[in-house]
Image: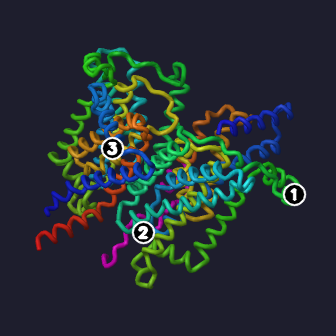
Amino acid sequence: MSKRLINILTPIFAVVLGIIFGTIIMLVSGYNPVDAFIALGQGAFGDVYQIGEVVRQVTPYILAGLAVAFAFRVGLFNIGVEGQFIVGWLAAVWVGVTFDLPAIIHLPLAILAAMIAGGLWAFVPGLLKARFRVHEVIVTIMMNYIALHTVNYIVNTKMNQGSSKTAKIHETASLRSDWLSNLTTGSSIHWGIIVAIICCFIMWFLLEKTTRGYELRAVGFNQDAAHYAGMNVNKNIILSMVISGCFAGVAGAMEGLGTFGYMAVQGGFTGVGFNGIAVALLGGNTALGVFFAALLFGILKIGALSMPLAGVPKELVDIIIALIVFFVASSYIIRIVLERFSKKEVK
Amino acid sequence: MSGLLFSLSNTVLATASNGHSGLSLMQILMIVVPSTLLWAAPLVFTSLGGVFSERSGVVNIGLEGLMVIGAFSSIVFNLTFSDTFGSATPWIALLVAMAAGAIFSILHAVAAITFRADHTVSGVAINLLAVGLTMFLVKLIYDKGETDIIKHSFGKVDIPVLKKIPYIGEIFFQNTYWTSFVAIIVAVIAWFFIYKTPFGLRLRSVGEHPMAADTMGINVTKMRYYGVIISGALGGIGGGVYAQSISQNFNHATISGQGFMALAAMIFGKWHPLGAMGAALFFGFAQSISIIGSSLPFLSNIPNVYLFIAPYVLTILALTGFIGRAEAPKADGVHYIKGSR
């Protein structure tokens, strides 16, 4: 079996295993898995409204997945997508409510602000990693909480327009469109999906088709070899974190300019950042893989909302997603099994 | 939790109105110290768990998830058996939480040690799974999004004998919680275990240089499993203490960041049991101040956002080397594959 085939089969195996275990959990708890999966399917594809909701949910997942995947490719684990996402959200909303500009400038400016905010938030762990060799996992986790509390403080004290929310962004900065909304009978779908797909393309192009991308990947494969070849490892580490943070910031802009149109005080993390880790892993850290993985998780998440109709708690999908991450992480064992299997075939 | 916060701030207000012209230092300490101990206890237990796991060379981001499991199992046990065991219920529930945490952590051990999964990714999976699984079970058992409030929780006590010490007794041993003192004692025991026993030496050696340890006949895999399972047990206790003394019920937001703060305490404490305990106490202080601070005279003007982010900022500074460099065990997060160099 070729290596490429195994690389494709491993995530599929993980998904299948996750669904099998989810089914077992339902059987043990006395639920009917067939009803549950039918409800899930209808919840995700039942009519155009549901499809619109799925697309809306997939949008930030793609971007968060790209953020995690980009850092992974350079050998860094950006667990701080959640924090960069929150600051990006706030920055986009701030531009959205503060300025009065024509849409052609306002919307890109708001997205740019989110990019810069996310990038800056990721610059800190990147710099500390490059300069002081501090492990980025811990710093990004800490930065998540700093982002959460700081953003809540700003929303509460500086931008509060009643009930712990900011004002609505101006129409000119909005990604929402009546046309899209009417097309899907009033779902919260917005143009962000186009932005997400463009970002997929940017990531692919940047990593695979540019010199800089080659350097970044070289650092990811072997820092010493990259250094020996004359590449500036530290600069590439910082750069990759910043770009990763930019993707995460744009993911936040999708919520701020599209889904919600405002920012509210967050009681806890949104989970988009952590789901981004799942998306990136399942997608094998490639742009195309991230797209499909985000699609799968978006379908699962939106479909799950209809599972209570079959009497099954929607948390079952969270369990399945967690198990998928678990199995992808343990892909070593799946690979071993696959390789044994293929060796037998040859004999 | 709101009930408890309310009663805390009530105490503050009552004390304040008694004092008329502001609070004396003694009164402030009598409010701040017990509340610090209350908030620190779960962090102490969980950060000690982190020390055991990471000293053996397994990164444990899953502490948060282990606390969730502990909180859930202790609350369910407490609600189910409160009539049978009466006032002893919380303590028995804590043992249940310990067992549940230990069992759940085996998943992390299997993935990270045997299946050679990336430790951080496996930890993330543990966190996602814990929240999903417990909320699924809450809905399955109680048919609603959160449990009822428990009847028997860890209440305020005066520690016998010690409470009579002048000043110190009033500040440290009155209106306080047994769990906090158990946590401190456990920290000392953990220090003894890790630094003064053959078991501890082996545990540290597989975290620093597994190949050397293997050469000396130490079973690296077994020691790492022990490390992770002990961390699961302590994380479970941490969650159980938090749920039964602070939140008093269980829902999706019961444990929100406590585990990561314990992780921060472990790092700030430089992977040392007593250091982790000290850091956890300090973070507990920051948390309690951020809640009751607005009632205290000299803190009411400072926005509590600074207190909320203080533990995290300090941890980053500690890692960077501004407050004494924190170094992880050498082989932390590195798989040991026999025969590889």
Estimate the x, y position of residue B335 in percent, counting from the top left. Answer: 37, 68
Is residue A130 something that shows in the picture? no
Q: Residue at x 66, y 64 (%)?
A: B186
Q: CA distance from mark 3 to mark 2?
A: 46 Å
Estimate the x, y position of residue B124 in percent, counting from the top left. Answer: 42, 52
Assign the C terminus of chain B to one quadrant of the image: bottom left
Q: CA distance from mark 3 to mark 1?
A: 66 Å
What residue range appears in magenta?
B313-341
For label 3, the residue is A34
Q: Residue at x 37, y 72 (%)?
A: B336
Q: Secondary structure at mark 2?
A: loop
For label 1, the residue is B165
Q: Amino acid at mark 3?
A: Val
User: Mark 3 falls within which chain?
Assistant: A
Mark 3, other Cα within 10 Å: few <14 / some 14–19 / many ≥20: few
Q: Amino acid at mark 1?
A: Ile
Q: Is residue B208 left or right of residue B300?
A: left
User: Sequence-wise, which precedes: disc 2 or disc 1?
Assistant: 1
